[in-house]
Amino acid sequence: MALAEWERALVRALNDPLPIEAEPFDTAARAAGVPVEQALERLRAWLNDGTIRRIGARVRHQKVGYTANGMSVWNVPRERADAAAEIMCERNEVSHCYLRPTMQGWPYSLFAMIHGRSEEEVRAVAAEIAREAGIDEYDVLFSTEEYKKSAPRFFE
Amino acid sequence: MDAFDRQLLDILQQEFPVVRRPFLALAERLGSTEDEVLARVRRLCDEGLVRGIGPVFDLHRLGYTSTLCAARVAPDKLADAAAFVNGYVEVTHNYRRDHAFNLWFTLIAPSPERIEEILAEIRAQDGVAEVTSLPAEKTYKIKVHFSTAKETE
């Protein structure tokens, strides 16, 4: 998708969080060199066509009790992946779900991030998914250390 | 965090109003005032519950490409390798996990060539035995919402 220079400037300005003030979009509009209503109209259009997935607050989930974050990984034959993924995605505890390539020493193709208030809770969700989807070979890898977690920065 | 904060946090995650004065719009929705909502949101940010408010772009629609990488790193070199990986602005998430593949990170870059360039540099690092890129073949779900509806103990 080819973006005009002002649109790239708008995206770039929005790499930083919105200031918490009465007219928070004004700064970004100014950086893009356009009237704020034009910037707002473009953001609404992007929300509409999926260029923007959502506009909202990024929450530090550990601070609202979701201290356990497990990367569940599943060995599923390709032809059953879609059906298995549907079962996983139905669950609110699953935030992300992807099909990826496998590699030597890693037979798992389906990845589902499961969030919960404890490791037990996360493992229990994985066990329920395993039962429902009929998958025997799976694992849940918890992040034992978070080295970095940042939002992407575009057009810099 | 009281009930008002919880309600505010839920709405803030999904439906930040795209209008000139969004906090006023939120206030009208919640039966409060613009000043009160601003104060509450500032506090949620100060307390570290909220990292920031902004758009989440679909990176592919902006012409970017992304991947998840799994690395096998010698345990005594892991901290240094992780710090090296962190140095790339293209790296957004970087975690240690309990597995032979003990370093997992995401890369977002303007081209597959840039991704390969970065991976080559990481592979050259001391203690890094293996790094494999596992780009998504299918994306089934990306929805991040942390409900505060239930009481935390």
Image (cartoon, helix red, strand yellow):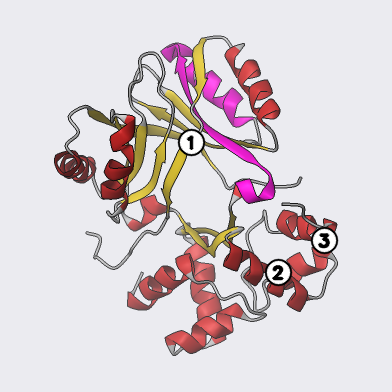
1 or 3: mark nearer the eye = 1
- Residue B149: x %, y % from top left: 29, 68
Viewer-side residue, A147 vs A79:
A79
Which residue is found at the position 36% from the left and 36% from the top? A111
> Mark 2 belongs to which subunit?
A
Q: Over which residues does the magenta segment extend?
A: B60-87
Amino acid carrying label 2: it is Arg
From the image, tell me which residue sits under label 2: A42
| Mark 1 to mark 3 CA distance (whole Å) | 31 Å
Residue B52: quadrant of the picture: bottom right
Q: Is residue B77 magenta?
A: yes
From the image, tell me which residue sits under label 1: B136
| Mark 2 to mark 3 CA distance (whole Å) | 11 Å
Q: Horizontal placement of B105 versus A129: left or right?
A: right
- Residue A143: x %, y % from top left: 37, 34
> Mark 3 belongs to which subunit?
A
Which residue is found at the position 65% from the left and 22% from the top? B116
Callouts 2 and 3 on one subunit: yes
The secondary structure type at the circle numbered 3 is helix
Q: Horizontal placement of B114 versus B55: left or right?
A: right
Looking at the image, which residue sits at the far left?
A131
Q: From the viewer's perspective, is residue A59 above or below residue A126?
A: below
The secondary structure type at the circle numbered 1 is loop
Viewer-side residue, B137 vs A52:
B137
Which residue is found at the position 33% from the left and 26% from the top? A108
* Residue A129, visible in the rendered structure: yes
Amino acid carrying label 1: it is Ala
From the image, tell me which residue sits under label 3: A6
| Mark 1 to mark 2 CA distance (whole Å) | 29 Å
Q: Is residue A62 magenta?
A: no
